[in-house]
Amino acid sequence: MAMNYDHVMSLREEGREFSYGDRETMLYALGVGFGQDALDERELDFVFEQGTLKTVPSMAVVLTRGNLTADIGWDYTKVLHGEQRLELYRPLPPEGELIADARVAEAYDKGEGKGALVLIETDVRLKSDGQPLFKVGATVFARGDGGFGGPKGSGPEPHPTPDRAPDFTSELETRPDQALLYRLNGDRNPLHADPGLAKSVGFPVPILHGLCTYGTACRAIVTTICNYDHTMIRGFDLRFSAPVYPGETIITDMWRDGDIVSFQCRLKERDLVVVKNGKCTLAS
């Protein structure tokens, strides 16, 4: 089935329930690199349940995986995760029961042979009090589905990167086995684990999940600008521009202007920008 605009815009899921506990919270933190120095108490606060367990704000994007796009009609082999957005109304608790409502917010037709953009939004509330907890947004680039009849457009305007030297820089190594660990958060796409499959689609080795790069960028800001205070982050948006191979070093350049931290990520080994137009919103 090919993509059809009216059908795509009708897709929604309401009242889907999820739950997570301290195990998932610690696994996510380990998956994005917290705890590599097992003697650093600031790191242990995210990966050890003794005391008050801290949550990595970017974990919100993996808590509510649904089936909204299962019947969307695109060519899944040509689908790329283009952008990720997050708005936190309050800090994530270390465990909880959630209710999520997901929908396709918009779908843009780039034209025959030029692909399509699909914007997906998910609103999440805590089951215990029914109050909003966070909102997740993603832009998906369906390279093989242009000409499906949707309106022209390009989605949200990208956040500009300041034209000055970075105010802060963080250099974080990824581990060679990091994709194998991170996939246990729910994304078991074999592209991140199967060497044969990776080579068949043009990669020398399995690539790191885009959302693991997203979480690593969040870790950089939590540790560098927030001084490990996870409650400071209220928004986290970025655009993916290239894949990372496990074992590479992600350098995050940051510019702070009041409550807004602009950022981008590049690789030390290949001098390649992998994240652009990053915007982190801090609590006032």
Image (spheres, grey):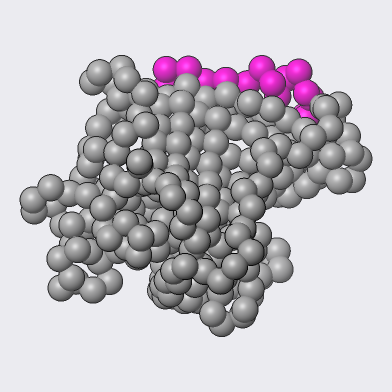
Q: Residue furthest bottom?
A: 269
Give me the residue at 52% from left, 55% from top: 262
96 left or right of 106?
left
Q: Quadrant of the N terminus?
A: top right
- Most foreground residue, 13 or 123: 123
The answer to whether any part of residue 213 appears in the image is no
Give me the residue at 18% from left, 70% from top: 40
In the rendered image, residue 25, in percent from the top left (x then y), is placed at 27, 48
Q: Residue furthest right?
A: 112
Quarter location, residue 172: bottom left
Q: Quadrant of the C terminus?
A: top left
In the rendered image, residue 155, in percent from the top left (x then y), is placed at 71, 37
Q: Is 141 situated above or below 31?
A: above
- Most foreground residue, 210 or 65: 210
Give me the residue at 56% from left, 62% from top: 264
Quarter location, residue 61: top left
* Label total for image: 0
**Magenta residues (range):** 1-18
189 left or right of 99?
right
The answer to whether any part of residue 12 appears in the image is yes
- Most foreground residue, 141 or 206: 141
Q: Is residue 257 magenta?
A: no
In the rendered image, residue 232, in percent from the top left (x then y), is placed at 32, 47
Q: Residue furthest left?
A: 51
Q: Is 262 situated above or below 4?
A: below
Give me the residue at 42% from left, 47% from top: 259
3 left or right of 23?
right
In the rendered image, residue 39, in percent from the top left (x then y), is placed at 15, 73
